[in-house]
């Protein structure tokens, strides 16, 4: 089963994708994670995209489509596309890549959250440096012993682009370039909407209901 999690920054795509990996053995393909990895390992491409990411703009379609194309031939259990596609060109490219592999997209899940909640969530977000588990100062704080519940690491980071200026730009990019994908997948009969504002477990249950029907 191959699915897309679609939604603005802070909607909870990464958190839900990680759950699906654990529960269903699917493979998470997050272009944001791939780009951050390229940055931290200092590749040429990583250096080229760093400033673009910090400003909250989208990197080029060519780069992200290339990253996805490289990963698509491996991984059982199906793929969760998290933060990809973000433009119509990327959506077309994904369709073609899946076609070539004789695979299809089973569901596109839009996680709907209002802007105010996004700003609050992102300001409170931190990530385990060991395994990438996502925490939130308010709704899911780092445990009192300072250790990640998943891997026990004690170092947590805040993303460079989780600041007010960059977030404003990321939201703008979402509404201008990514939200047209809602109509695109709706027209193909593939879109389902879940309420991304609920508790993590409630959102997971809504996603499960969609996948059980797909
Ligand atoms: P994310 O972790 O998904 O919020 O992505 C972080 C940043 O990486 C975004 O603000 C973009 O600069 C870049 N990025 C991630 N995925 C894409 C994509 N599919 N297309 C263009 N830029 C992307």
Image: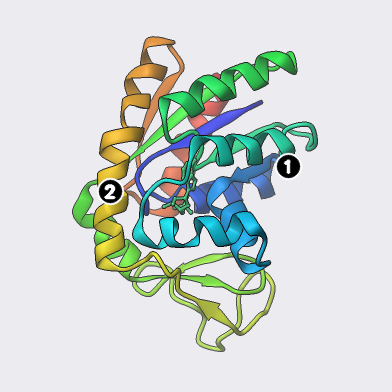
Kindly state the secondary structure of the residue where label 2 is placed.
helix
Read off the residue under disc 2: 171
**For discs 1 and 2, the disc positioned in front in the rendered view:** 2
Read off the residue under disc 1: 25
Quadrant placement of the C terminus: top right
Q: How is the image coloured?
A: rainbow
State how far apart marks 1 and 2 are (Cα): 31 Å
Quadrant placement of the N terminus: top right
Image coordinates of residue 69 in percent, x first then y, are 68, 33
Please say if the residues under marks 1 and 2 sit with CB atoms less than 8 Å apart: no
| Residue at 36% in and 34% down | 178
Q: Nearer the viewer, residue 140 or 107?
A: 107
Instruction: State the image quarter where residue 184 is shown.
Output: top left
| Residue at 21% in and 50% down | 115
Position of residue 92 relative to residue 139, above or below, is above
The answer to whether any part of residue 165 appears in the image is yes
Position of residue 169 relative to residue 93, above or below, is below
Kindly state the secondary structure of the residue where label 1 is placed.
loop
């Amino acid at each position: 089963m191959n699915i897309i999690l679609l939604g603005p920054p802070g909607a909870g795509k990464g958190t839900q994708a990680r759950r699906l990996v654990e529960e269903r053995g699917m493979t998470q393909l997050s272009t944001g994670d791939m780009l951050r990895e390229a940055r931290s390992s200092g590749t040429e491409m990583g250096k080229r995209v760093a400033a673009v990411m910090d400003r909250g703009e989208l990197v080029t379609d060519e780069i992200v489509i290339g990253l996805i194309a490289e990963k698509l031939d491996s991984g059982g259990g199906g793929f969760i596309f998290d933060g990809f596609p973000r433009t119509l060109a990327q959506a077309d490219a994904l369709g073609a890549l899946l076609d070539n592999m004789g695979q299809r997209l089973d569901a596109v899940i839009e996680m709907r959250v209002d802007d105010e909640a996004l700003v609050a969530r992102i300001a409170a977000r931190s990530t385990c440096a060991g395994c990438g588990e996502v925490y939130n100062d308010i709704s899911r704080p780092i445990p009192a012993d300072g250790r990640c519940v998943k891997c026990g690491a004690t170092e947590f980071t805040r993303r460079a682009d989780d600041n007010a200026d960059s977030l404003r730009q990321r939201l703008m990019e979402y509404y201008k370039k990514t939200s047209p994908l809602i109509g695109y997948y709706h027209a193909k009969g593939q879109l389902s909407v879940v309420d991304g504002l609920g508790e993590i477990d409630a959102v997971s249950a809504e996603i499960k209901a969609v996948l059980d029907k797909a």
